[in-house]
């Protein structure tokens, strides 16, 4: 005579056996194939921006409340909690931040820093700056980081302009005006901002206005405008000039 539930017990025993086999084979496989952030993340170079008062107190993507005075940042893909070393390629200043949000959502930008973190590398003044981001060294806490250790050959490459200036012998040049300000301080900030993305700008005074312009050769015009577009400089006046 069959015991009640015998067939069911056999089914349960098979399920249990399958689970045991899965535990034996799948768990070690997972342990062997697990990939850490260190294995897949390569240093990035690009434009950094920052966000502050407007977002203070709002929820970040990982559920925290954004604190503009904390050492945090937004990145498009890095796991939350990752500590990243950010180096300003213009002057070598560095800061370590923790990723707790997603962004930036503007083409050409690779990281959004909190207001406090931005201040440590001078980004709060220029608004945008060319940076290198890499995983922070083990055991390092968030906050300012000595820049002398990061100003290596690769970092110094950030000083090379994306586009060279037209020589004095050039008879045809392109003038790209990106801003006009009454306050010379704003004009100076714009020049710093443009330098951070590899474009050398000049300030030309006209009456009470300080006009900020970039000069290029005709063959460099499209590249210059592409860089400006990526960094958010959409409004500009472009004119070819003969010397």
Image: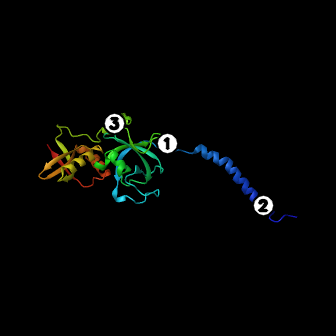
Q: Residues within 10 Å of mark 1 (few under 14, many from 20)?
A: few
Give the labeled residue for mark 1.
38
**Residue at the limit of the structure toward the bottom, as seen here:** 4
Q: Residues within 10 Å of mark 2 (few under 14, many from 20)?
A: few
Vertically, is 235 above or below 193? below
Vertically, is 107 above or below 38? below
Residue at figure coordinates x 26%, y 45% from the top left: 192
| Viewer-nearest residue: 150 or 242 | 150
Can residue 128 be seen from the camera position used here? no
**SS of the residue at dot 2?**
helix
Give the labeled residue for mark 3.
156
Can residue 40 be seen from the camera position used here? yes
Q: Position of residue 210 (x, y in %)?
A: 17, 50
**SS of the residue at dot 1?**
helix
The reply, left or right, for residue 235 in relation to residue 61 is left
The reply, left or right, for residue 118 in relation to residue 8 is left
| Viewer-nearest residue: 202 or 70 | 70
Alpha carbons under labels 2 and 3: distance apart: 71 Å
Q: Position of residue 127 (x, y in %)?
A: 30, 50
Sequence-first tag of 1 and 3: 1
Give the labeled residue for mark 2.
9
Q: Which mark is residue 105?
A: none
Residue at figure coordinates x 32%, y 51% from the top left: 230
Q: Position of residue 75 (x, y in %)?
A: 42, 51
């Amino acid at each position: 005579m069959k015991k009640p539930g015998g067939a069911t017990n056999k089914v349960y025993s098979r399920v249990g056996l399958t689970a045991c086999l899965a535990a034996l084979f799948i768990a070690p496989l997972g342990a062997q194939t697990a990939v850490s952030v260190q294995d897949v993340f390569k240093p990035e170079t690009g434009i950094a921006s920052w966000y502050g008062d407007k977002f203070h107190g709002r929820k970040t993507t990982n559920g925290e409340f954004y604190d503009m005075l904390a050492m945090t940042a937004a990145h498009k893909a890095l796991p939350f909690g990752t500590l990243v070393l950010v180096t300003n390629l213009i002057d070598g200043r560095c800061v370590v931040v923790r990723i707790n949000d997603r962004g930036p959502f503007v083409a050409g930008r690779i990281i959004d820093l909190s207001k406090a973190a931005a201040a440590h590398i001078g980004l709060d003044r220029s608004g945008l700056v060319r940076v290198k981001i890499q995983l922070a060294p083990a055991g390092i806490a968030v906050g300012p980081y000595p820049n002398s250790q990061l100003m290596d050959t690769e970092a110094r490459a950030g000083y090379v302009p994306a586009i060279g200036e037209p020589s004095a012998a050039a008879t045809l040049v392109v003038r790209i005006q990106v801003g006009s300000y009454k306050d010379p301080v704003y004009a100076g900030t714009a020049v710093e901002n443009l330098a951070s993305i590899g474009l050398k700008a000049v300030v030309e005074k006209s009456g009470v206005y300080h006009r900020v312009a970039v000069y290029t050769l005709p063959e460099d015009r499209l590249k210059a405008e592409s860089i400006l577009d990526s960094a958010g400089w959409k409004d500009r006046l472009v004119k070819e000039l003969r010397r």
